[in-house]
Amino acid sequence: MGAEILFYPTAIGSEPHDSTIDSKDHWQTCMLGHAASNLVPVVASNRIGVEEDEDSKITFYGSSFIAGPQGNKIEEAGRKEEAVLVAEFDLDALDAQRIEWGIFRDRRPDLYKIITSYDGELTI
């Protein structure tokens, strides 16, 4: 068994020392990719508003969203307002679809340690 829905509570916004950088689309694309590659819904919540001190200013993107299991946005909040988003999923049907599509059939957990090590060497 594994996760049936992925929840990502975030506080993503402009870069503290360069408020002209807007990576909202990149953030959302990454989250949509998690949904599609695992065939699992993703709920990504994000802050709104501004946080400022004497050295930096961050404007949070808001734009919380719910992604369907194939990486499509189902619901999305705006950048500046609080919102409650709701979606329904048939988790049993998604589980069956993951099996049918072979999402996890060809994975190799025995290799994870190697591909996540710094130098690619297996050290036990």
Image (cartoon, rainbow, N blue to C red):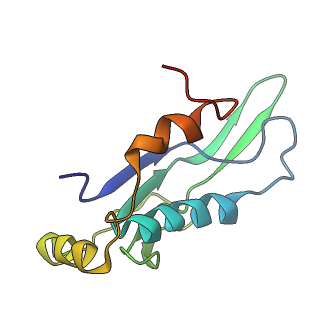
Tell me residue 48's x, y (percent).
Answer: 56, 50
Tell me residue 95's x, y (percent).
Answer: 19, 70
Q: Is residue 79 visible?
A: no
Q: Nearer the viewer, residue 48 or 7?
A: 7
Which residue sits at x=31%, y=79%?
101
Q: Residue furthest left?
A: 92
Q: Is residue 68 visible?
A: yes
Which residue sits at x=76%, y=25%?
53
Quarter residue 25 falls in: bottom right
Tell me residue 17's x, y (percent).
Answer: 86, 35
Q: Nearer the viewer, residue 23 or 53?
A: 23
Q: Taking 41 as reference, is 2 left or right?
A: left
Above or below for 41 versus 61: below
Which residue sits at x=72%, y=40%?
58
Tell me residue 65's x, y (percent).
Answer: 45, 65
Above or below for 23 versus 65: above
Q: Nearer the viewer, residue 110 or 29?
A: 110
Q: Taking 59 as reference, is 122 left or right?
A: left
Above or below for 53 versus 48: above
Above or below for 58 versus 83: above
How many marks do you count on the picture?
A: 0
